Each structure stands twice: as C-alpha cells, then as structure tokens.
Image (cartoon, rainbow, N blue to C red):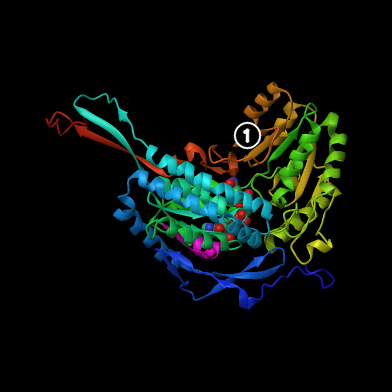
Amino acid sequence: MATSTRQTNAAAEKPEEMKKHRLLIGGNWAEPSTGKWFESMNPYTARPWALVPRSAKEDINRAVAAAKAAFHDPAWRGLTATARGHLLRKLADLIAADAERLGKIESTDNGKLIAEMAAQVRYIPQWFHYFGGLADKIEGRVIPIDKPGVFNFTREEPLGVVAAITPWNSPLLLATWKLAPALAAGNTVVWKPSEFSSVSALEFGELFERAGFPPGVVNIVTGFGNEVGEALVTHRDVAKVAFTGGDKTGEQVYAMAARGIKHVTLELGGKSANIVFDDAEVEEAVKGVVSGIFAATGQTCIAGSRALIHRPIYEQFVEKLLALAKTAKMGNPLETSTQVGPVTTQPQYQKVLDYIRIAKEEGAVCALGGGPAKRPECGDGWFVEPTIFTGVKPEMRIAQEEVFGPVLSIIPFEDEEEAIRIANDTMYGLAAGVWTTSIRRALTMSERLAAGTVWVNTYRAVSYMSPFGGYKRSGIGRESGIDAIREYLQTKSVWIDTVGKAPNPFVMR
Ligand code: NDP
C-alpha cells in the first residue's frame, strides 16, 4: 500500500539493530527449537523492528512441562497465600518502575498511541496489587451438613497449568487480566502473546524473575496461532485456557478445549452500541461517541462501533460529530499529541478497507473518511481515515460484524423500544453506552441491554475492581474484580467422620 511519493516514517531500525528475543521457559531464556525467528513490524513505519522466536510444539511441550513441575514444586505450592500475594505486589512495583519503557515498546510494536499504551501499563500494577491482596482471602466454607457424625468443609484449590492466549491490541493489559488472578489463586502459566505484538511480553518476562517468582511459574512462548496456539490449547497437561481474541478463533479454541474437558474463559469481540437520547448532554455525548470509536483507532473490543441516535437530535448530532471527528490528529503514535494512529497489522488494515468497501456497496453513505489516510504525517504506515457512515440499516454487515478499525455506523431510532431492539440485535454483547439525563431511562436501559458492561454518560472505562466480560458471542466468564479469581479455582468438598463408627458399607451414608 505504500507509494514512493509518500513520506517515509522509517526511523533508525536497520535490520542489524533489531533485538533478537528469546523464550522464557522454566526460568531460562531459551532459543526456539526451530532455530527460527520472525520479524515484528512497526505499524507506523511498516518496517520490521524486532525479531521474535518462532516456536513449535516442542517448545510448548517444554513450557507446559516447566509449568507443571513448578505447580507441584514446594517453592511455589508450598508458599503461604500471603507470600504468594507478596510476590504479586512486588511484581506490581517493578512494573510501575518500568512502565514508561514498556509502554513505548507496546506503542512501537502495535502502533497504538503512546498516551494510551503508557497509561495502560501505568495502570497494570493495580491488578497485581488487587489480586495480590485477594490471594490470602480465598476461603472455603464449613457446611452445616445434614448428616450426623460428619464434618464437611470446602477448599478452593488452583486448577494447575493455565494457558493464557492474548491478542495484539493491548498485549500487557489483557495478559494481566489473566495472570494476576491465575497466579493469586496459585496456578502456573504458559502465555502465548499474539504473533503481531510479542515484544512487550518477552520484555515483561524479566520482571517475574526479579520479583522472585520461582522458575517455571510463568513461561512465555511466542509463535503463530495455528502452530503454538493450538499445541498449547490441546496439551493434555493444560487445565484451563484463558483466551482473548476474535470470536471465530474463540470458537475454535472452545472446541479444542472441549475435547480435553478444560476450563475456559473467552473474551471475544463486540459490536457495541453507543446510544444517544434527545435528553443527553449533547456536547459530552459527541465526545463519548468519538472516544468510543476513534480512540485506539477502533482496535478495541469495546469499540462503540454503532452510534444509535435519537431521531429528534439526529441531524444536529451528526453535524457536531463530523465536526469533531474531522479534527482528529493522525500521525506518529509515539507523539503524545497524536489522536489516531495506524492500524496494527497489514491484514487488519486490509480488512478495515474491505469493510469500508462493503459498506459502500450495501448503500451506506460515507460522511467522513472512507479509505487509506494519505496525509503526509501518515507516511508509509497502515493508516485508515476516521470513517463515519450514515444511512446505515441495522441488518447491514457494517452494522452487524466487528470491523476492529476506525469505522463508525450511525443509525437513527425513534424511541427506547427501538433503541433496545437495534442495540441487542447482533450476535455480540460485550458493551453498550447510554447518554441520557433521565435516571429512569439510565436504569431501564442498563437493565434491558444484553451486554456485559453498560456505561451511562461515559464510555471505555475499566477497572481492576469491576467484572468484565461478554454476553452472547462476546464470551464466557469474567475478568477483573472478585469474580475473576473464581475462574482460576476449583472447589473440593472434604468429609471427615467424627464418630469413628463404620456405617453400613452397603448403604450410601
Ligand atoms: P485472534 O483471534 O486472531 O488471535 C488471538 C490470539 O489467539 C492470538 O495470540 C493468536 O495468535 C491466537 N490464535 C490464533 N489462532 C489460534 C488457534 N487456532 N489456536 C490457539 N490460538 C490461536 O484475535 P486478534 O489478535 O486479531 O485480536 C483481535 C480480536 O480480539 C478482536 O476480535 C477483539 O474484539 C478481540 N478482543 C477481545 C477483548 C475482550 O476482552 N473481549 C479485548 C481485546 C480484543 P496469532 O496472533 O499468532 O494468530
């Protein structure tokens, strides 16, 4: 897609300067068994900037064996829950001290704004503090059992080896949502980051050793989804798969995990509706709709990719929205003033352009953008103009399918009933936004929207304290908040005879 007349962003990343990374297996930095590396691309320059190990099934086998050994090793299994929590909090402090460097790596590797990636990495320590604090509050129960002469209680135990599989859009944050509760609960982990953004994961790996985690508790194996991802999900010693990614991959992962009767959490895609009523604070709602789709270049699972606008304010709202969206500053994601960066991967860039073409073919009206960004400040990078379609019908593909790019569909509605019907009429159910000054409407809408998260008069807020996850095809299970730790535990019921008298061996007690 690069043309010779366009300005080049290529910085000083000459191939000979590219860092050759290694895998973290059993506490050692290892070369991949294949002896092969692949190039990680900088989406802003469209040039390679680092070398990532291309692992194979053999590396997964080594990593799972290390995680299994660590799970049973007294160095980890024998730690008190308080000591385990302390390790997580130590890790949190190390991440905080390294946040700027890690944020810059993420921004270089996935092209998302440094303002966003640095803020995410600065926030990550809170998950490790929170779940570190929860580690020694995992309690069983004493059951007032209905049978005399028996003491019955429950224990909450870790599952074993957890496979953490993450996408390219927020590599460290989404891994943290899995690692923090998994480790707090006493599991061990093999983490496979996306092939498109593995560098921050491999740099992050060093911090586990410095925090004092025993070798093998966290292992990091890079490579391609169909090679190492599948090998990891199907490995017989993996007890749980914690996956974030697209729903089609999620479906495959779910099916593979089912064959091994494994525990699963799936955090998948979305087609979230941002619903603006005529009683909303319009200026705030305009900002909310823009932040929902153009922040992170739309590459966020919670992107508010459908704006549902109440008919009485439709014309006025669209006008204000276009005016604000037009001002978005595109360019180098490492500059803090940039507002819209490139699309992270070349295939994703193509996919976004394909959806823009499909929307036009379906009859949607392109009111803004609608193609590659040919601005000088975008150079050779994979940039797509912030794009807004009006005249979108709810049944169009552009209103039903996840684009994962800076493309907004605007749909008018007449009343609450119609807003609910349109908002809920997709196969997804990850998030929704409601803009209204009516408390009755806020409560009614948050009850009736089929989504795991509903924001009222705000958008894209997440916290380590609040559960996050999808309805319908957006996923299974919850991350963050107290609910998340249950996803990494299993309950054991223990029965102790207190009378010492053998019951009738032929009758169930
Ligand atoms: P993918 O589903 O393509 O990939 C996700 C991860 O799965 C990657 O590490 C990928 O590896 C791996 N993978 C691919 N194929 C397999 C396989 N057969 N077996 C096991 N693992 C496999 O998603 P993207 O990376 O493209 O991320 C974008 C998607 O993630 C969007 O749909 C977005 O909505 C979703 N997402 C959901 C979030 C949520 O919390 N609900 C948050 C953020 C994103 P590789 O990269 O090597 O292909």
- Residue at 36% x, 43% y: name it: 82
Q: Position of residue 349 (x, y in %)?
A: 72, 60
Q: Nearer the viewer, residue 383 or 99?
A: 99
- Among all residues in the image, which is located at the extreme left? 501
Residue 336 appears at what percent x and percent y? 72, 54
Q: Is residue 82 left or right of residue 92?
A: left
- In the depicted view, which residue is nearer to us: 196 or 308? 196
Residue 42 position within the rendered picture, expressed as x and y whole percent measured from the top left: 67, 65
Quick one: SS at disc 1? loop
Q: Is residue 352 visible?
A: yes
Q: Quadrant of residue 136?
A: top left
Name the outermost residue toward the top.
440
Q: Which residues are magenta?
A: 218-230
Magenta stretch: includes residue 363? no
Residue at the outermost front position? 97
Can residue 251 be seen in this snapshot?
no
Taking the spot 77% from the left edge, 46% from the top edge, the residue there is: 408
Q: Residues within 10 Å of mark 1 (few under 14, many from 20)?
A: many
Label count reads 1
On the rendered structure, is 67 left or right of 38? left
Residue that mark 1 sits on: 450
Residue in the picture at 42% in, 59% down:
235
Amino acid at the residue labelled 1: Ala
Quarter containing the N terminus: bottom right
